[in-house]
Amino acid sequence: MSIRLGNSCVNCENLLEGNTCKKHGVQVGNSYTCDSFEMKAALKTEQNCISCVRFETSDCANPQKAAPGMSCNHWAPQTASA
């Protein structure tokens, strides 16, 4: 089973504060989606050694270079939820 980022309202640029849909004017939740979904464009800056589960462990692919603010192709989140 593949896990993918869903087209839910949480990832839509039409979501306003208070979980209100700008396009439809209704309250929405994490499991809502619609045909007007537009993905939020955002840079993910939290992916670095500090947030990696392998940081300072024997599983680290680059133990000599790993440091706060750095990242690599072996990055894995410390916590994940689906």
Image (cartoon, rainbow, N blue to C red):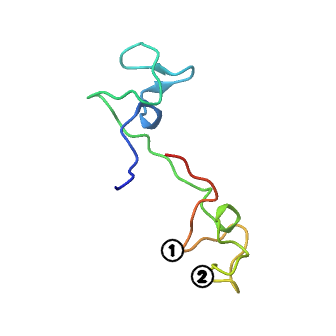
Q: Amino acid at mark 2?
A: Ala
- Whether 35 is drawn above or below 27: the answer is below
Look at 38% across and 40% down and name the residue there: 39
Q: Above or below — where is 21 with respect to 76? A: above
> What residue is at 73 percent from the left and 75 percent from the top?
56
From the viewer's perspective, is 55 left or right of 16? Answer: right
Q: Is residue 57 above or below residue 81?
A: below
Lateral position of residue 35 relative to residue 80, left or right: left
Residue at the farthest bottom position: 64
Could you tell me if the residues under marks 1 and 2 are in contact, i.e. CB atoms within 8 Å?
yes
The residue labelled by disc 2 is 61
Instruction: Name the residue tied to disc 1.
Output: 73
Residue at x-position 49% and y-position 47%? 42
Marked residue nearer the N-terminal end (1 or 2): 2
Mark 1: secondary structure: loop
The amino acid at mark 1 is Asn
For label 2, the SS is loop
- 6 or 16, which lies in front? 6
- Find the residue positioned furthest to the front: 1
> Which quadrant is the N terminus positioned in?
bottom left
Residue farthest to the top, as pictured: 25
From the top left corner, tell me how far across and down residue 59 is, in percent: 63, 79
In the image, 27: left or right of 6? right
